[in-house]
């Protein structure tokens, strides 16, 4: 019983960390702070614009696979219990 | 070869593939009909999900919207992809563990209530029907524009094709056809993009080309910004969609709405395990991202091409109307492009000032459809775009129709009215429901209601404000009881409908709108389409408050929750 709770806590913590990045890369970089980030240029792109039109999407993909990998590790660890 | 002939051949080939798959993937049990037997590999499932998700809107309209909105178009790019993170982390794995065939079934189990199930079914049907109307229109229009088959017959052909693989194969047939449709869609979308990116910037990868330089050494985006702002438009890279607040809530509503759409969630019932559901979401986003990260390039380059074809630095050298190229003439005859010589000089002025602008109608859909023609690409590429658009519409329509049909046969028939129905009879009922749903969708395709365009926003609003919160609370809260959940769902729906109707008219009849579709009256400056997130918030709050007044869920439900939390 205690192990189930621990497992769930670890899951929530992992989810929260991932969602923080999810929020930052889209709402913060792409919307709220976009004008500031636009002051930085990468090639022909203003950085804020790039995050909002491409960068956020790349991070989303990486986040999902990162979550799947990490939670799988945690699953294995708690499997025996 | 002539464009018409190419189009017939290529589209015909794709249809032959779909029908072939229909025969190969026949469903022989309810499990196969609803969830393809749970046997689909995560990568294949991801591909099918991507096709299911990307409708005619993603394929045709999105790049067009981006080309006119510039930075503001980011709400669609982030909104329609970010939801997959929510699905993967918060919903899909747990719903898969529970193992039901439909979303309302999960809601009825978790909230131990037939009422909750019926509310969920109502949301699902409203959301899915409004969504499918758009797809049917897309199919009819694609046929009439590309194949010179008239709208009604085109619609009928589309319906017959879907009928084959959806009625015979259910989710099994639909999944494999969606995979084929994905391959066709992505090829059709990226080939013109690669060509045009290479022609403009020397870089064939559109994602890099967009940030690259033009022949004269200036950066593409800088050039676009300066050209259109000189013409009186807002700068492309900074043109926000109204305010920061509106963009924030619009994006949030789209993300939550994506995660709450039943036809998308159902796509995760078809894999073997919980972990397969997670990685399948990742793969789905990979395949979606290929198109979605190409779209900004398509949009910007199309805009640049369009503007520079018409306008020259010296406006006395603008394109003369009589000299207009054949793509211009073709799209004029369809009514999607319209010119009015306001200053009677025979030259075309395309400006951002409504008084001087002579291109009085430039339909945004043209940007994707005419882009290959504007860039002078060969006919087979243009024919491929037609096939891709049809693939996009058919794949999404099928997913929606399955969501509707399964909620009728599984949730209403087996779940509520005839619980004793046997497996074989249920399978037959599900086939009949599918045929009925296709007929209904066809009917609305023939007689599209006036409000058809605005209703996809309604679908997202309902999914965001009603379904998503109910599912999330069901998984993450052990104390959410049926009274709270039902109250929450109903209040979320009401708030969303109220806001949309008061600004767009009850059932979208304009004369009944009492606050008018006027910006100053929008709550916090948030447009009606962006209100789903507020509806979701209302749902959470009402559900929380109401749940406190009623008993906690019974022990078996607590056990159920613990079970779905364990992979």
Image: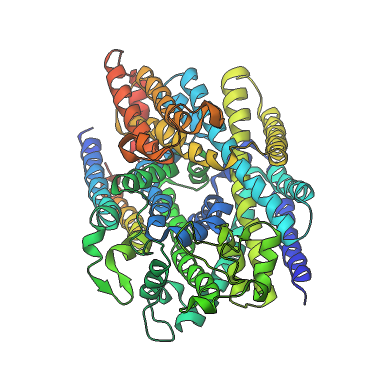
- B65 to B528, vertically: above or below: below
In the rendered image, which quarter contains the N terminus of chain B?
Answer: bottom right
Task: Residue B459: give x, y in percent of width and height.
Answer: 50, 37
Give B426 or B443, whichever is nearer the viewer: B443
- B418 to B132, vertically: above or below: above
- B554 to B408, vertically: above or below: above
Q: How many marks?
A: 0
- Whether residue B308 is visible to the viewer of this picture, yes or no, is yes
Give A23 or B280, whichever is nearer the viewer: A23
Residue reaching furthest bottom?
Answer: B216
Give B357 or B382, whichever is nearer the viewer: B357
In the rendered image, which quarter contains the C terminus of chain B?
Answer: top left
The answer to whether B538 appears left or right of B171 in the picture is: left
Residue drawn at x 57%, y 19% as measured from the top left: B416
Residue reaching furthest front?
Answer: B344
Task: Residue B87: give x, y in percent of width and height.
Answer: 40, 45
Residue drawn at x 57%, y 62% as measured from the top left: B342
Task: Residue A40: give x, y in percent of width and height.
Answer: 23, 70
């Amino acid at each position: 019983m205690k192990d189930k709770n621990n497992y769930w806590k670890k899951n929530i913590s992992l989810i929260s960390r991932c969602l923080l990045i999810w929020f930052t890369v889209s709402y913060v970089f792409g919307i709220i702070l976009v004008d500031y980030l636009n002051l930085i240029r990468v090639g022909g792109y203003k950085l804020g614009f790039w995050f909002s039109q491409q960068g956020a999407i790349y991070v989303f993909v990486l986040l999902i696979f990162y979550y799947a990998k990490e939670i799988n590790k945690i699953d294995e660890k708690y499997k025996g219990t | 070869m002539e464009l018409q002939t190419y189009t017939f051949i290529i589209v015909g080939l794709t249809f032959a593939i779909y029908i072939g798959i229909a025969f190969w993937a026949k469903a022989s049990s309810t499990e196969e009909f609803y969830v393809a037997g749970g046997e689909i590999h995560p990568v294949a499932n991801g591909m099918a999900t991507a096709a299911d998700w990307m409708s005619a809107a993603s394929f045709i309209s999105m790049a067009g919207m981006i080309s006119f909105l510039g930075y503001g178009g980011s709400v669609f790019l982030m909104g329609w992809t970010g939801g997959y993170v929510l699905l993967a982390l918060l919903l899909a794995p747990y719903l898969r563990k529970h193992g039901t065939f439909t979303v309302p079934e999960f809601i009825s189990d978790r909230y131990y209530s037939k009422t909750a199930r019926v509310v969920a079914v109502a949301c699902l049907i409203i959301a899915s029907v409004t969504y499918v109307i758009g797809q049917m229109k897309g199919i009819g229009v694609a046929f009439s524009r590309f194949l010179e088959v008239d709208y009604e017959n085109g619609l009928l052909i589309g319906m017959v094709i879907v009928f084959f693989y959806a009625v015979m194969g259910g989710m099994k047939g639909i999944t494999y056809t969606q995979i084929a449709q994905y391959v066709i869609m992505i090829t059709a979308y990226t080939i013109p993009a690669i060509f045009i990116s290479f022609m403009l910037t020397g870089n064939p990868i559109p994602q890099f080309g967009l940030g690259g330089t033009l022949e004269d050494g200036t950066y593409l985006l800088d050039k676009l910004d300066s050209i259109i702002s000189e013409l009186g438009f807002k700068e492309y890279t900074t043109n926000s969609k109204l305010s920061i607040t509106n963009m924030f809530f619009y994006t949030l509503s789209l993300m939550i709405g994506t995660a709450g759409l039943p036809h998308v969630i159902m796509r995760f019932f078809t894999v073997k395990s919980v972990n397969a559901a997670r990685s399948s979401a990742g793969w789905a986003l990979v395949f979606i991202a290929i198109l979605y990260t190409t779209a900004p390039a398509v949009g910007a380059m199309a805009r640049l091409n369009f503007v520079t074809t018409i306008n020259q630095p010296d406006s006395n050298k603008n394109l003369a109307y009589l000299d207009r190229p054949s793509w211009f003439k073709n799209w004029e005859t369809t009514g999607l492009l319209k010119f009015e010589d306001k200053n009677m000089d025979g030259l075309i002025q395309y400006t951002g000032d409504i008084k001087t602008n002579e291109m009085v109608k430039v339909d945004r859909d043209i940007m994707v459809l005419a882009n290959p023609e504007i860039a002078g690409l060969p006919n087979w590429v243009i024919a491929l775009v037609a096939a891709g658009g049809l693939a996009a519409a058919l794949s999404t329509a099928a997913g929606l129709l399955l969501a509707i049909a399964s909620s009728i046969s599984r949730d209403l028939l087996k779940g509520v009215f005839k619980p004793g129905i046997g497996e074989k009879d249920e399978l037959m009922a599900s086939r009949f429901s599918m045929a009925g749903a296709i007929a209904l969708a066809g009917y609305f395709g023939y007689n599209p209601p006036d409000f058809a365009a605005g209703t996809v926003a309604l679908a997202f609003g309902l999914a965001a404000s009603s379904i998503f919160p109910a599912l999330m609370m069901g998984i993450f809260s052990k104390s959410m009881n049926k009274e709270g959940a039902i109250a929450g769902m109903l209040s979320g729906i009401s708030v969303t409908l109220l806001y949309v109707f008061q600004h767009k008219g009850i059932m979208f009849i304009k004369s009944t709108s009492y606050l008018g579709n006027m910006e100053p009256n929008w709550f916090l400056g948030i447009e009606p389409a962006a209100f789903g997130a507020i509806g979701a918030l209302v749902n959470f709050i009402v559900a929380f408050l109401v749940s406190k007044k009623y008993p906690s869920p019974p022990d078996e439900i607590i056990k159920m929750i613990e079970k779905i939390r364990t992979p």
